[in-house]
Structure formats: structure tokens, C-alpha cells
Image (cartoon, helix red, strand yellow):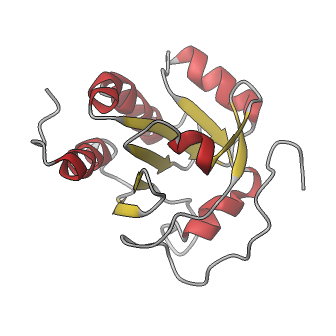
Amino acid sequence: MSPTNALAATTASENPVAAGDAAPAFSLRDQDGKLWSLTDLLAGQKALVLFFYPADETYGCTKEACSFRDSHDVFVEAGARVVGISSDSVASHARFAGKHSLNYTLLSDAGGVLAGRFGAPNAFGGLIKGRTTYVIDASGTVRGVFSSLLQFTRHIDEALAAVRALQGRTTNRT
């Protein structure tokens, strides 16, 4: 186990994580090298929005990351923490977050181990890593799963709607 990708010692699921399932436990390093667990990320939050994306500095991933950045305050007001995850390194995440002024945590999933445990789908026969967002409630239960490789910003609206549904609130970003 590498120091940048310390995953909890549980077995990978053959089935994708779906709404109603418990989110897999994990520990991963962020863009600053800090180790975060699922429990740490949920602490004091009503919801956690985890979005898996293919790679730092690609067109679609940058558009998605910046859209989450631009909507970050709305997620915080709704009681949610936003976290991006890709297999890029801690150093790559640090550059990406700095260049685009990302105001949330990016986790390094070296080798895509956690993405595999979540069952985050790949696209085009596995040639391209997928883009999937999970909304997890305070108890660690997945409440929403949204997958779309080419609709880069759709996840923001879907995730916010799911977070607000946990509170019985409206779904507009404003």
C-alpha cells in the first residue's frame, strides 16, 4: 500500500455501488498530502458529494471541476462537502487546484482502486475512465449516483438536487 493511497482493507465489490448502499470505507491523500477517510469527510456534514473524474487538466474535467468550484457555496449552504477524485497524483492535484482556484478537496486514487470499489463505470469499453458522482448522507449511505462522461456540468445540478432532497429543499443552484 503506497503512502498516497492507503485504502481500508476491505474487498472490492463486483457490483457497482447504488443508491441505498453503504459507501465503501477509504483513506486517500488530498492535494496537500493530508490523509482523509470517509468518516473524516462526513464529520459535521449533512451530505458528501464525491465526484470521480478521468484526469486533471483535460477539457471536460476542468469544466466539471470549475463548475463545482463555482457552485461550492451553494453546496456548503445545503450542508454538503464536495470532493473530487481521480487517479492523478497528489502533486498533479495540487497544480490543478492551484491553477483553477478549486475551493474543495481533491483526492488521489492511485491506480483507480477506490473508483473500482465504487464500481464507477468506464466508457468506450474501458478505454476512458468514467465520470460518476455519488451523494452520500451523514450516515454513509449513498443517496444518489449520477454518471455521464460527456455532459460535464450535469452532475452539479443532479448532485445539488439530491443534497437538497435530503433536506426537502428546492433544486435550483441560486
Residue 80 location (% of width, % of height): 37, 37
Residue extending furthest toward the bottom: 14
Which quadrant of the view contains residue 34?
A: top right
> Which image quadrant: the C terminus?
top left
Residue 61 against residue 100 in the figure, above or below = below
Lateral position of residue 36 relative to residue 46, left or right: right
As rendered, which of 143 and 56 lies closer to the eye?
A: 143
Residue 119 against residue 160 in the figure, above or below = below
As rendered, which of 98 and 21 lies closer to the eye?
A: 21
The number of callouts visible is 0
Residue 65 location (% of width, % of height): 44, 33
As rendered, which of 138 and 117 lies closer to the eye?
A: 138
Lateral position of residue 38 relative to residue 154, left or right: right
Lateral position of residue 9 relative to residue 107, left or right: right
Q: Residue at x 41, y 63 (%)?
A: 142
Q: Residue at x 57, y 22 (%)?
A: 97
> Which image quadrant: the N terminus?
bottom right
Residue 72 against residue 136 in the figure, above or below = above
Q: Residue at x 22, y 43 (%)?
A: 157
As rendered, which of 21 and 152 lies closer to the eye?
A: 21
Residue 151 location (% of width, % of height): 30, 50
Q: Residue at x 30, y 48 (%)?
A: 159
Residue 147 location (% of width, % of height): 37, 61
